[in-house]
Amino acid sequence: MRFLLTDEQREFARTLDSLLGAAGTPAAVRAWAAGEHKPGRDLWARLAETGVFALAVPEEHDGMGPLPVELAVTFVELGRHAVPGPLVETVAAAALLHRLGDADAAADWLPRIAAGEALVGLCAEDAPFALDADAADTVLVVRDDTVCRTETHGPVQPALDPARRLSRPLGGTVLARGPAVTAAARHATDLARLLTAAQALGLGRALLDGTVDHVKQRTQFGRPIGSFQAVKHRLADTLIGLEFAQPLVHAAALALAAEDPSAGAEAAAAKAAAGEACYAAARTALQLHGAVGYTDEPDLSLWIRKARPLRDAWGTPAACRARVLAG
Amino acid sequence: MDLDASDADAAFRAEARAWLAAHVPAAPLPSLETREGFAAHRDWERRLAADRWSVVSWPAEHGGRDASLFQWLIFEEEYYAAGAPGRVSQNGINLLAPTLFEHGTPEQRARVLGPMATGEVVWAQAWSEPEAGSDLASLRSTAVRTDGGWRLRGQKTWSSRAAFADRAFGLFRSEPGTPRPHQGLTYLMFPLDAPGVTVRPIGRLDGKPAFAELFLDDVFVPDADVIGEPGQGWRVAMSTAGNERGLTLRSPGRFTAAAERLTALWRETADPTDTALRDRVADAVIGARAYQLFTYANASRLAGGGSLGAESSLNKVFWSELDIALHETALDLLGPHGALADDADEAPAHGSWAEGYTFSLAGPVYAGTNEIQRNIIAERLLGLPKEARG
């Protein structure tokens, strides 16, 4: 047993972190929220060059996956930098398409997903709204044992996080039907939960790091507020939440990679823990930034607004907890 | 990255599971915090030691199996899953033994470790004093040089197991008037039945004499019972204090087994529409799994030559709060029966939730309070400035 990321995995994370750090993601997030997708799609293209989307796609369709552990590592960094777009949905859709048994649909979409050219929306029981359907090239909709594909959607509705653009998918043509769909959709949901958890973990880390920097500099009563015990203890608890969510994310990735029967429960546990830890980090960030934390001008707001929707995406905490106890 | 057991680890798990299945007492032993229970637990330690299961990670020459850290974790998982009794020797095994392995002389190891492993000599820790709890360096009990050894004077308190234990270990001020409070301390072992020692049991919240205070009036300790250099006691103690908060004091097996029992209790007793209670059960299960996995990651780091420092403070806060959450949730599931002690006629059949609950309440207090641990986390792991003092 060696339950630690390899040097290569850590190096890959560092590479993504510096790429995204230099890419001006906050501007892309603000543009995305305004319905202007070009900067976000450029960001996707740069990510595709590093192989990020190929991790989701099997070799026979020009990918190098599926590699859930490397995907989890990737999504921590995507979350850390609040990269916009249907990232989780596109990767989960790749898993769904690969398992549907529809060779044409797989051959049509998987190489384009691997290349970062296709943004794919995905709706299922835990995700009734299509995320970023206005930007997506297609949307897959799972209902019971049927998968449909559609390019039509209702109006984009105002949302808590304006960079997560939500609409109802409309119409569609049937891609596949039957028990294979149910099994494939279950796997796609487990993967979506894992990657949402990883994204939440990265988002939470960014919120904690930014808040730690802030409380070291911000002085009140003649001292940095980070020297006050009430502030310290809140940040310590935030770190504890994130530190203990991380191994759950790693274990869920391993279980999905091995197609272990425990994968569903492990992904749900990771999602519940990371979602709550990230949301707690956002609450802490807002509180310790004071009134600044309540304004939308600093980039901090982009991260804070994402925390609650991520906590509830692909299974609310209650749904995930019920899944854990179902075993 | 993997979670796969090697062939050797899988064989070790199978051997431990088989032995425990054949040997764990069918009926629970009486509480080890009573005289009768203490004796019964000593017998159990002897049976464990006879087949070399009492200290699996120790070298074979001292009664162990040279087991790796992973194998120790595996053993603990199997131990608690089998419902085996709590360990009356744990203060010695978890706190004194690592210190002896690091700082003791070969003579001390040869003399102390064997009887510790068999339960023949049960050790109590004597760190705290009435004025020195989390601020351990402020302790006042003294060790004064005499012919061939030292004379101890002062008072120790909250000494776990000291009501029935045989010997104790702790720190004493041997050089009064040092410029800093953690200088001039000496780490010593002493018998609890020596002339000059008075042991006064202190009742816990549930009334059991789980600890005691010790009054030391000119107690002689030979030089052979000093661990490390005289005056260097703080360094000696701190080099192994991480064990108490970190990996070895509260093994994950204890919590994963409790989470299993809690889940079983929930399936049998809970109202399925009570989703608030269901969520707390799930959180306890998730917390136990997180603690297990976090420990695997730390064990991997240590096996790769890394070390743990302030990270053990993360552990301490997490397991102590998890322990309370597990037991509070169980008491809520038990409803009116949750108010009964474990030895009541109508006590719940699934384990010692009442005693476990009482014990869990102490978790945030001992081994360095959680307030101190959160300061350590904030200052050493997050790099926040020290609080203004004085």
Image (tube, coloured by chain):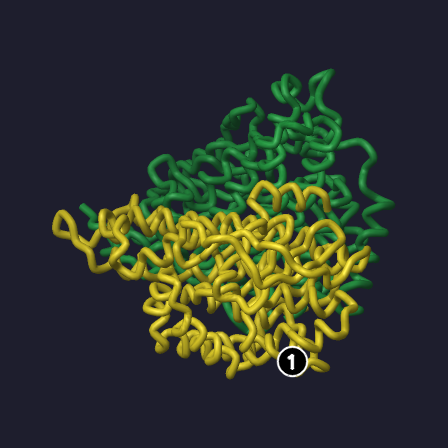
Residue in the picture at 39% in, 55% down: A162
Tell me where residue B218 appears, x and y as whole percent. 41, 40
Residue in the picture at 58% in, 25% down: B208
Residue in the picture at 47% in, 69% down: A77
- Image quadrant in which the N terminus of chain B is located: bottom right
Q: Is residue B281 above or below residue B151?
A: above
Task: Chain letter for mark 1, please.
Answer: A
Residue B260 vs residue A99, the one in the foreground: A99
- Left or right: B146 with respect to B88? left
Which chain appears yellow? A
- Left or right: B93 with respect to A106? left
Tell me where residue B95 appears, x and y as whole percent. 54, 52
Q: Is residue B100 visible?
A: no
Q: Is residue A102 above or below residue A190?
A: below
- Left or right: A105 with respect to B250? right
In this view, which residue lies farthest toward the left?
Answer: A222
Q: Is residue A169 above or below residue B126?
A: below
Residue neighbourhood size for the residue with mark 1, other residues' Cα within 10 Å, grouped as few (<14), some (14–19), many (≥20) = many
Residue A307 vs residue A219, the one in the foreground: A307
Count of picture labels: 1
Q: Which element is circle 1 on?
A: loop
Tell me where residue B326 appears, x and y as whole percent. 60, 37
Q: Which residue is mark 1?
A: A63
Question: What kind of residue is marked 1?
Answer: Gly
Residue A282 vs residue A239, the one in the foreground: A282
Which chain appears green? B
Tell me where residue B303 appears, x and y as whole percent. 60, 70
Q: Is residue A284 above or below residue B58?
A: above
Q: Is residue B293 visible?
A: yes
